Image (cartoon, grey):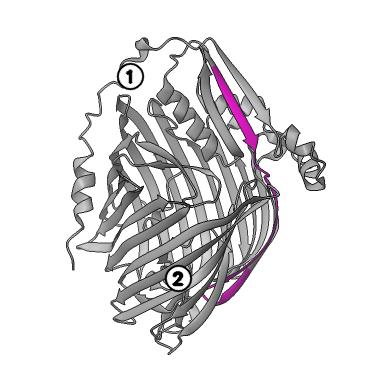
Amino acid sequence: MTGRPQHAQDEVRGIRRARPGARPPRLVLVLLASLPLVPVGEAPAQPQEASSFPAITAIEVRREDVFSPSEEALGFFPYGLANVLHAVTKEKFIRRELLLSVGDPLDPDVLAEAERRLRATRLFRRVRVRSEGTTVVVETGDNWTLLPRFSYSNKGGVITYQVGLEEQNLLGTGRGLAFKYDSGTERISRSLAYDHPQLFGSRIQLHVAASDLSDGQAAEASLARPFDSLTSPRAFWVYWRQENVNATLWTGGEESAVWKRRERGFSALVGRLSRATRELADRWGGLVQWEDVSLQPGGHGPPPPPDDRKFLWIGGGIEREARGWIERQDVEQIGRDEDFNLAPGGRIDLSVSAPVFGARTAGRVRVNGSTGRLLPAGFTIATLAAQTRIQGGPQNALVEASIRGWWMAKGWTLASRIGVRNGWRIDPEKQLVLDGENGVRGYRLHAVAGTGNTTANVELRRVLVPDVLKLASLGMALFGDAGYSWGPPDGGWRLADAGVGFRVGLPRAGKNVLLRIDVARAFHPDPLGRSGWLLSFSSGQAF
């Protein structure tokens, strides 16, 4: 419960939810071993050695606009215009995010945690939290957060575009307001969203969003008070969602069925700190969740099988969060400070559904976690996410595991990833897809569908021209992708590609800080016999 939990139906990333027998990897055992069994009645313990640090006597916040006074003094028109149109983040917002007060111990680890928390808001291009004697000095430089949305992408051969307006830092308060018209890969969406990270001056976060879709409607709302530090004593999260959309199934790269999918859901979670040290926190939590999913014929292909998923889940879980942070540049972004946690941690959740209010009897198990390792010239991070529903045996059992690595030397970054996804008796509208959005950039969307796949990616990146006019940085990449898909409907398929890419980093942007253009050559044909070159462009790294 370290943040807003991922939606229950999309726990394992990359599953195409009609839109969008091997042993588990050793990583499962490592993550399970790292999670202690925590007595529910145990009182929270505070980190040790706090008394060995002097007390904070003052907190000084030094704020800076999108462009500093010295940069604005250069007279370059965009610098001054950006500062005029942008409201500098308010000091009271920054102070609330710090979770520091005068009189607290001047703990360097706590200062580093406060810096990471400010950086995670994505409102700042530069953050420094340090001590000068017993005074805490906070220095921030704002990102440009008013984003006209005129994006245009080619994702796996499908053109998408987006038009709208988004403000991530409304009047310097940290609140977000966005309107978007999005012609995506599956549907057209007209959406409105509002986010308030400090409701009524507290640490409670509000999120509200509604979408009018070309094939239905969707709406969601959440209220959360997350664990935002190792010593946060408690947390809660309430989430509501409804959605009516088309669910599209693919066979051999072509549509094979379209169904109407109706979903209603409500979740309430609470969490409590059980034990905390300077390096880790153990927590337990409880869950109540209503889940109602139904499928109806959609006018194309065979009708869906009988499938009425109504569950009233009641359960709980244990969680470990540990502190093993490193700070790097030019890993996933260009010219930005990035934070990576290498400490082992994870969560286990168990819940049951009783036959009340029309719900069905079932059980559910979820496990997720990560661990990393620092290497002489880089680092690696391994992740795991697994879930299953127990209902006359395992149902909708999904596992995803990956290992990612980065090595940096003489201005070059070598990035790699190996991943595996597998499903057993998955829900009828879900497919595991191998395509240009899921591991192999040289192939079109929905190229191959199955019950599992594995992918391997490698990319050599280099920044060519950093910080052009303090507005953009230019880079390039050489890459190769390979994947293998198995299971119905398409069976076994091997796909592989290689290519070259162009990168544009936006050092003053709050979102979409990296633009990516890739040209890839597919070496093996897909089920429709397609191979050759494919141009794709989007935001963010491919893996």
- Mark nearer the viewer, 1 or 2: 1
Q: Which residue is mark 1?
A: 46
Q: The C terminus appears in which quarter of the rendering?
A: bottom left
Q: Is residue 49 visible?
A: yes
Instruction: Using residue 443 as the reference point, say whether residue 182 is left or right of it.
Output: right
Which residue was labeled with disc 2?
A: 18
For residue 492, side relative to residue 153 (left or right): left
What whole-number distance in Å separates the C-alpha atoms at marks 1 and 2?
46 Å
The residue closer to the viewer here, 107 or 485, is 107
Q: Earlier in the sequence, mark 1 or mark 2?
A: 2
**Secondary element at tag 2:** loop
Q: Is residue 490 above or below residue 395?
A: below
Return the x and y of residue 276 as percentages of the image width and height.
Answer: 31, 25
The percent coordinates of residue 319 (x first, y second) are 30, 38
Residue 61 rendering spot, x and y as whole percentages: 62, 22
The magenta stretch is: 136-160
Answer whether residue 152 is magenta in the image. yes
- What's the residue at 46%, 51% (across, down)? 331
Kindly identify the amino acid type of the residue bearing the numbered disc 1: Gln
Magenta region includes residue 456: no
Locate residue 471, reporting x and y percent: 68, 50
The quarter of the rendered structure image containing the N terminus is: top left
